Amino acid sequence: QVQLVESGGGLVQAGGSLRLSCAASGRAFSPSVMRWLRQAPGKEREFVAAIRWSGGSTSYTDSVKGRFTIARDNAKNTVYLQMNSLKPEDTAVYYCNADTRATPSTRYWGQGTQVTVSS
């Protein structure tokens, strides 16, 4: 069984920075891709960023391009989300997920971490 545990959320003023971490544990964890998503109050969960475990290619939603950076540490089975120039509209619960390489693939989710950006 794979577990994903997010950390690093908190309260920050607009313009500030936070770094989220998502640590994976479990037997033979071998993801194909890991993602960050977020869900603001009253809104649907939305994609934020993704990273391919092999090769490290990344993708971002337009609203965070140039401000957020996703990165991974293969040895630690951890994915990070560096968030700079935070805006109040970034306030949300941030979740990570991971898809395994196996066929069929399994998707695992973390429990989420709250990010609140004050104006």
Image (cartoon, rainbow, N blue to C red):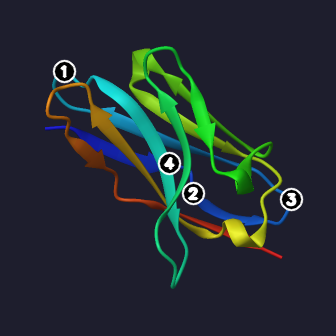
Instruction: Say which amino acid is labelled 1.
Output: Ala
Element on which disc 3 rests: loop
Depth check, mark 4 against mark 3: the one in front is: 4
Helix, strand or loop at mark 4: strand
Residue at 51%, 85% in the rendered image: 42
Residue under pointer 2: 9
Q: Closer to the N terminus: mark 1 or mark 3?
A: 3
Q: Residues within 10 Å of mark 3 (few under 14, many from 20)?
A: some
Q: Is residue 91 left or right of residue 88?
A: left
Q: Quadrant of the C terminus?
A: bottom right
Question: Which residue in the structure is indicated by mark 4?
Answer: 36
Q: Which circle, 3 or 2, is nearer the viewer?
A: 3
Cβ atoms at labels 4 and 2 below 8 Å apart:
no
Q: Residues within 10 Å of mark 4 (few under 14, many from 20)?
A: many
Q: Identify the mark nearer the N-term, 3 or 2.
A: 2
Mark linked to residue 15: 3
Estimate how packed mark 2 is, as few (under 14), some (14 to 19) or many (20 or more) residues with alpha carbons within 10 Å: some
Residue 59 location, quadrant: top right
- Alpha carbon separation for disc pair 1 and 4: 21 Å
SS of the residue under disc 1: loop
Using the image, determine if residue 103 lies above or below residue 46.
Answer: above
Secondary structure, mark 2, is loop
Inter-mark Cα distance, 4 to 2:
13 Å
Distance between the alpha carbons at the discs numbered 4 and 3: 20 Å
Residue located beneath label 1 in the image = 28
